[in-house]
Every structure is written in structure tokens, then in C-alpha cells.
Image (cartoon, grey):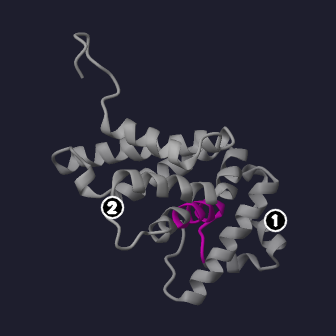
Amino acid sequence: MYKQCRTEQSSNRQRLLEQGLLDAMLQQHYDSISVSDLCERMGIPRKSFYRYFSGKEGALHALIDHAIMDYENYQNPEGEGRTVLRDMERAFSYWKCNSRLLDALEKSGLSGVLIERSINLAIREGTVPQQYLAAEGKGMRERVTGFAVCGLMSMVIYWHHSGYEESIEQMAQTALRLVTKPLFTDLSGQS
């Protein structure tokens, strides 16, 4: 799909190509962008593109994955105790700052790819702190992680689509309620 770069120079070139795809997606639908068009737009030979990506889908996946991975370095509070509320505020703040990517994905109907890549990366890398997960056993933790990440990213996408009507703090409070309180009560009125 895409190359894991070993040098900073190579990584920077790959990121420039990803940004070229993002810029193109902001102007036209992903399906109408060809590798040739992208290379022509960026003034590079096709073989340069294929040094980093197996195709256009690889560039899309790299763009999304790198955005997700960059979250780990985004306003990581030092010295503060980590809480679910702070993590939620940080997540909503990060994705609001990355609205260009959300715009491009929405324009091409690819928001689901962001959700899928987010879930896969969270499960593979274990990015959800274990102390937040109540589930026992690895298989159940993966399911809970997938459910939580899918819900959070769906909230981000809906919030973006609605024009960020709620504040970051309001979204974080809503997300916190959803992950810490039962969603439904049983027929007897107990949760």
C-alpha cells in the first residue's frame, strides 16, 4: 500500500505527495483523480510516486494514517494527569484543526475510510489507554476499542458535517457521557 520511510528526507517527500492528493481532493472527487493527473499537478514523474505508494489508494491510506498518527503528538499535555475528558477535548480539538482532511473525505464520500483506518490503527497500536477499557481479555478489548473509536470518529465526522455547531468542550462532555454512562436501561428501569 505505502512505504514506511526510513529517512526524514524520504518521509518529507512522501508527506508532500499526500498533501498533493489532499489538495486535489479538495478540488475534485477522489474517483476522478488519476495518478497521472496527480503527478502532473505536482510536477513529478510517475515513478517518483510509485517509490512511495502502490497506487492512489495507498496514498489515501498514508494520508489518513499519518493524520491519525500525528494525533499522538498533538497538544500532549505534560505534567497533567490524563483523564478521559482531557483526551476527548484533545481529540475534538485535533480533528477540528484537521478540517481540510475531513472536508476532502466528505466531498468524496470517504469518511468511512477514516473510521475504518482509525479503528484498525487503535487496535493494532493499542492507542486507547488500557485503564479506560473495562473489558476483560484481548478479544473483548479489541471489540470495545473498535466500538469506542468508531463512535468517537462518527461523532467527529457528524460534528464537522454540521459545521462545528457545538463547542469542543460540549462535544467532549457528550462523548464522556456516552463512554461512561449506560446508553440504555433495561425494562425494569435499571441500567
Indicate the amino acid at tag 2: Arg
Q: Give the labeled residue for mark 2.
A: 82
- Kindly indicate the quadrant of the structure image that contains residue 79: bottom left
Report whether residue 33 is seen.
no
Identified at 49% across, 64% down, the residue is: 71
Task: Report whether residue 73 is seen.
Answer: yes
Front-lying residue, 142 or 57: 142
Residue placed at 66% from the left, 69% from the top? 18
- Mark 1 — residue? 37
Q: State whether the magenta stretch is mostly helix, strand or loop.
A: helix
Element assignment for label 1: helix
Which label number is shown at residue 71?
Answer: none
Magenta stretch encompasses residue 62: yes
C-alpha gap between disc 1 and disc 2: 45 Å
Q: Position of residue 75 (x, y in %)?
A: 49, 68
Image position of 134 with respect to 3: above or below: above
Query: Observer-nearest residue: 40 or 10?
Result: 10
From the image, state whether disc 1 or disc 2 is nearer to you: 2
Residue 30 is situated, as x and y percent measured from the top left of the image, at 72, 52
Q: Is residue 185 left or right of residue 60?
A: left
Residue that appears at 22% across and 10% down:
188
Horizontal and vertical percent for residue 63?
60, 64
Magenta residue span: 52-66
Which quarter shows the C terminus? Answer: top left
Q: Amino acid at mark 1?
A: Asp
